[in-house]
Structure formats: C-alpha cells, structure tokens
Amino acid sequence: MDGYLITILSNIGMVSFVALSAYILLLSGQISFGQQAYFGIGAYVAGIATVMWQWPLAGALLFGSLAAGAAAGLVGLATLRLSGIYFAMATLAFAEIMRIAAELFVYRRDIGGIESGPDGVDGFRDIRYFFANEFSPLETCLIVYALLATVLAILCIIERTRAGRMLRQIGEDPLLAEVHGINVMSVRMIAALAAGAVAGLGGGLYAHLMTYVEPKSFDIMLGVHALAYGLIGGLGTAFGPILGVLIDIGLLESTRIFHGYRMIVFGGLVAVLLIVRPRGLLDEVAVSRIRRALRRRRDAGD
Amino acid sequence: MLELANLSKHFGGVRAVDSLNLKIEPGQIFGLIGPNGSGKSTTVNLITGLLDVTHGSITLAGEEITRLPTHVRLSSGIARTFQNIRLFGQLTVWQNLWVAENARAQRERTNFFSRWMGGDRGARARITRALEFSGLADKADELAANLAFGEQRRLELARALAAEPKLLLLDEPAAGMNPEEIGALDDRIRQIRDSGITVLLIEHHMELIMAIADRIAVLNFGQKIAEGTPAEVQAHPAVREAYLGTAG
C-alpha cells in the first residue's frame, strides 16, 4: 500500500473516534458541540505520558482516555440538566475554554538532552513514540483500526442490551422514558463518560500518529464535523458515523474532486440530508431493513 | 391504594390543585372529572412525579411517595397513559412494549449486570401476551408512528399494563374515539379492574365514566366540590352549577 492511502486510512480511523463520541450523545438526545475538547485532552495527556513520563503506549492511551472520560463526567455534572440549544452552547463554551487553556499551557522539561513538552500556542511537538520504536505507517494504521474495531464491537453489543435501548428511548422522549422507570440523568451521565473516553482514545492516537498536537487541532470545526458524521451516516447503528467519516474524508477530502469547494459540498450534503433523511443514511428504518434482509439470506443459505 | 392528603400545587398565584383530599380503595375504578382547567391533569402529573408538590402528601399502598423521583414511581407500581398519546414513534410496537419490561427489571433485579445487560427471555412471552390482549399481534414490527389512531391508543394502554402496575392512571383514554371504540374501551377498563388493578380514570366522556366508575370525584378550580357514586355526583347541586352555570 502506498503512503498516501495509509495516511488517509489512518485519518479516517482517528476521526471516527470523535464521530462515535458525538454519536453516543446524539443517541441520548443531546447535541454536543464540544466533543473535540476530550479529543484534545486525550491527545495532550497521552502525549505527555509517553514523552515526559516515558510510559508505554498502551498505558498512555488508556490514561488519556480515562482523563478525557473524567473531564466529560465533570462537565456532565454541570451541563446534563440542560437540553437542546442550551446544552449545545454549554458544551461549546467548555470546549473553547479547553482550547484556550491549551494555548496557555506550558510544561517543558529536558528529556534526553532535548527540551520537550507542550509549549502554549506552538503546541506539543516531537511525540516520537512510533518513530523511536520503529513502527511502520502500516503498523500504526493497524493499531488505529484494531482499537476502532474494539470500540465499535463494544458499542454494537451495548446497543443490543437493556442499557443501549434505554439510551435510544431517552433520546426519543426523555419524559416518557422517565415515566417508564428509566433514570434519565444517570443513563445520560454514563453516556457522557463513555463519549468522553472514546474521544480521548482517538486523541491519544492522533497525537502519536501526527507526532504533534496543537490547540488548533481540536477547534470547533472538529466538533461540528463529528456531529455531522452521525447525521450524514445515520443514527441507526454505530456504523453510521463511520460511513459519514468515509464519505467526508474518504471521498471528498482525499480524492480532491471538489478541491477548494469541499466545505461547500459538505455543508450542502448535511443540509440536504437533514431535510430528506433527518436521521442519516443508515437510520433506524434502513438498519432494520438490512437486518431483515441478512436474516432472510442466512435462512435461505441453511 | 392511593391517598392524597391536602395535596396542593401552586403556579405562582394560581392554585391549580388546592388542598385536595382523595382516597382510592384497591380494586376500584375511580373517576376524576371536572371542567377544563379544573386541575385533573395537574393531579395526574403530581401523582406520577412530573410536577413537584407544593404542599401535602401522596401515599401509595401505605408508602409515602411524595418526594420520590419519577423514574422510581413506575417501579413502585404506578403506570399511566397520556391525554395526547405519547409513544416512542421511531421504535416498533414490540420495542415500545419492551420499555415496560425495563420497569420490571428495575424492580426485580438487584444485580447490576442483569439490570443493565439482561436479555429478553422472560420478556418475550409477556410481550406476546400483551400484544394479543390489545389486538396488535400482527403489528409487532411496525413503527409506532405508523399505526392508526385507535391502535396507538391500544398500544399505549398495553404498554402501561405490561409494567404490571398496582395503580393505572388513564388520562382521557376515550378522547378522539368513535362510539364503537368507546364501547370496546369500556369493556377493556372493566377487565383491567377485574384483574386486580386499581384504575384512576380522567375523562370528559360522561356516558363512559358514569357507566363504569365505582366512585367519582369532581374538581373545579383545583378544589374537590363533590364525591360519591355516579348517581350521587350527578344529583349534586355544586356539580350541576360547575358544569351548567348557576341554575336559572
């Protein structure tokens, strides 16, 4: 495989984590414009762990993910009682606070003769774990997809359990869910924690694959895209947001067919889909139709 | 079964429910009537916890539930339907009924894992039964939003029953129904009572409520103005005044 293709695939994989993060909250009926903050927290924390503390990659990714989840929990305590536009505003405000805090964050130390660490607006450079340990781009890409597959598998299993169905019921009508014995606040809190952790994991991978991260890497555009991926790809299954990422990065960005006009095409696509298919291409109806077709084919095959 | 003592709900200066005392015996169909804006729906929202009580207390089967959060009340045995039908429109009929199974899980299962992850084994049989009782067996895979109006009402009732409540609150179940459907509803509500569930029925349709209620309370401006058997209530002068204006 050539380097360009591997880079595109890695990008798709990493952005998918943020898309899934926004998707989890969309299922619970909350629109967050702030999932990029947890991506950023995961990136900085995991980067600091490997560079400054010499942690192994697995531990650093896990720690970054947990830190992002914890931050999401704290933000959740303050914001989850809000709904609709108020929740969206509060999450966006928090994400901007985090981005600006990252611009002010300086933590430099001498590591092996080179001064490294986050350096305010200049960001955090030389996160050389993969380089130092001689991973090839293909291997790092495989690491991204192994982790993405794990997260996807867990999400697909959870969606079929009581907890997953409760999440969808809350998303559709929180009051009705409450009347049916569902503790809406605690389910939303669990969703927020999980969403933060998933975004943080993606951030940790991003920092190591790109070898640097800067406050700009997690500005509002990342959050807006993350939301749009679920809305384009569909909210009927966890594969929906991944499809959204594929369409945007895989088709629009990487082939450069709409070079220079990509954001116009992307915005138009979102607008058209919101009108004709408000819950995305793979919405609940499409998913149940596909499931039925698969079942029929399997039965016919027996 | 249900006792409201001195129950009040004030919205600013408006007393939507004002020192209401009610006692509903187990196994009754208890009717709650009154002109528009007399506080009937507010009372139901207080009982289900969707509104906070200003004063007074609510007791269910000897247990005070005045301050319990809404989601706990269903597992303690209260189920309701809504005046304007409320279904999970984008879920199928089957999935809508499955929601009620959740209440059972919260009530019966103490183990964290089975509470959140538990599957459908026992639920399948119960949901099938609920589908048959409500005559929706062939619609299990339809989206609730695509059902006809009457079917949606039946589904809402089936869902409330699937939670196996002790007390069922019906908020205007006959609204928008034709006489034939009302006749069927009449039978169904009696069946529900005969199966041991206490029913609190709010209704504008006088014929229905006079025919099936064991006891009726009449509200006006948030206060109870009369209570008794259907015959007693019909003869009560305050009720005639509230409904027809001052007698000429």
Image: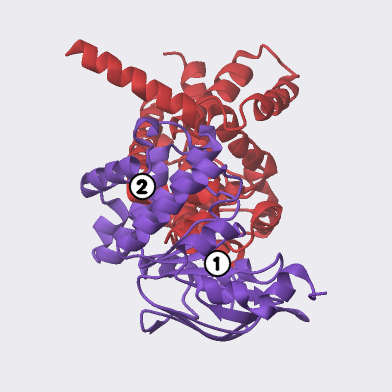
Element type where label 1 sits in the image = helix
Q: Chain of mark 1?
A: A
Image point (38%, 26%), residue name: A136
In this image, B37 relative to A132: left or right? right
Q: Badge 1 local density, few (<14 within 10 Å), some, or many (20+)?
A: few
Give the x, y percent position of residue A4: 52, 17
Q: Amino acid at mark 2?
A: Trp
Outermost residue toward the left in this view? A302
Element type where label 2 sits in the image = helix
Give the x, y percent position of residue A240: 49, 30
Q: Which residue is mark 1?
A: A77
Residue B187 in sight: yes
What color is chain A drawn in? red
Is residue B4 or residue B102 the one in the foreground?
B4
In this image, A96 relative to A156: left or right? right
Q: How far, Cα to Cα, is label 2 from label 1?
A: 29 Å
- Which chain is assigned purple? B
Image point (53%, 62%), residue name: B209
Q: Which residue is mark 2?
A: B98
Q: Chain of mark 2?
A: B
Q: How many marks?
A: 2
In this image, B193 relative to A67: left or right? left
Give the x, y percent position of residue B106: 32, 63
Q: Amino acid at mark 1?
A: Leu
Q: Quadrant of residue A212?
A: top right
Is residue A190 or residue A1 the one in the foreground?
A190
Is residue B83 or residue A282 the one in the foreground?
B83
Q: Quadrant of residue B217?
A: bottom right
